[in-house]
Amino acid sequence: MFIRLGYEIGISCSQPTPMMTFLSVDRARRHDIVSERGPISDPVVKMGEVTDPFGNVCMRMVIPAGGLRLSYDAVIKDSGRPDQVNRGAQAVPVEKLPPECLQYLSASRYCETDRFGALAWRLFGEMEPGWARVQAICDYVHQRLTFSYGYTATLRTAMEAHEERAGVCRDYAHLAVTLCRCMNMPARYVNGYMSDIGVTDNPAPMDFNAWFEVFLDDRWYTFDARHNIPRIGRIAVARGRDAADIPLIQTFGKHELTTFKVWTSTEADGALTKPHSRADVSLVTPWFSERWSRLVQQREHEREH
């Protein structure tokens, strides 16, 4: 299977401004890229690639006064298999965890484990440590929150999402990560590209998404409390303790984001000969779906009654 992915970003600023981006395909998937164009900047600026403390690929550059437009377009080969499911995977006792996993047990900017301990143990303490417990957490978060771009809040924490019972994919991931950490299971936040492969009639189309991973047995497994089913075609970009560690773009000065379009779709081959699809999906002015609005209203009505 071939998956087309890319972005177009426009940034305006009044003076030269340093910027970092976490938009490059995860290093472990680089060998799967069959064709790519970019990243390309207009005007042309010097770009450098560095690795952050979590092992993510980060691009560094300085935006000139006036701003720039940054674009990337690529086709990557994918197995077409859904997320791996291993219902027998067990939680690893804390004293036996690899040292690099320990940082994913503690509180972080958006994941306040100290505020969830009692609730987490009350809800999930009687469940078998491991896959079953993580899935129960996903089920709880999936039912607890209502998804809608209308509820987007950049600084919303896991506790705020839990109490407001609303959010977007990052809020689902933050809340699930927090509850897993409370149950002594290392959990980390992941963002990346994901289209609607194998999903029909989706009123909330995907492009750039957030999910999470939990360390069980001897490896990290993918979970997604937002969709709560195995999905096909995830292309990871970056991993961290939460979204604060891996912002899509980070500038060190005043700026205005004028364009942020993302596309992800299947392709018949690996050539970049056709225009990409869904270029009208913008993260600056997100899509609005009448059908999705009705679904949100129906769900809230059901909760009240």
Image (tube, rainbow, N blue to C red):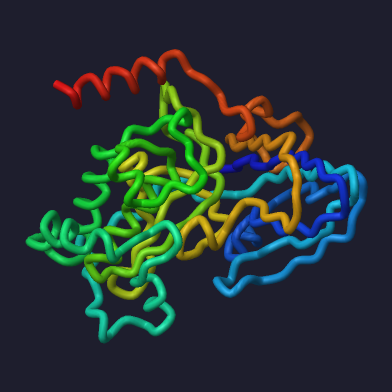
Most foreground residue, 218 or 167:
167
Q: Is residue 149 above or below residue 173?
A: above
Q: Is residue 69 left or right of residue 285?
A: right
Q: Residue at x 75, y 66 (%)?
A: 49
Viewed as shown, does residue 98 lie left or right of 129? right
Q: Give the quadrant of residue 246.
A: bottom right
**Residue 68 screen position, x and y as percent:** 85, 44
Residue at image x 24%, y 59%? 116
Give x and y (percent) for residue 40. Answer: 83, 48
| Residue 92 picture quarter | bottom left
Would residue 93 be found to the left or right of residue 24 on screen? left
> Residue 244 at what x, y percent from top left?
53, 58
Nearest the eye: 264 or 48:
48
Q: Quadrant of the N terminus?
A: top right
- Residue 111 in picture, x, y percent from top left: 38, 59
Residue at (43% x, 39% y) in the render: 168
Image quadrant containing the C terminus: top left
In this picture, is 295 found above or below 117? Answer: above
Q: Nearer the viewer, residue 238 or 275?
A: 238
Residue appearing at x 73%, y 39% in the figure: 8
Q: How many numbered circles does the render carry? A: 0
Residue extending farthest to the left is 126
Foreground of the two, 62 or 254: 254
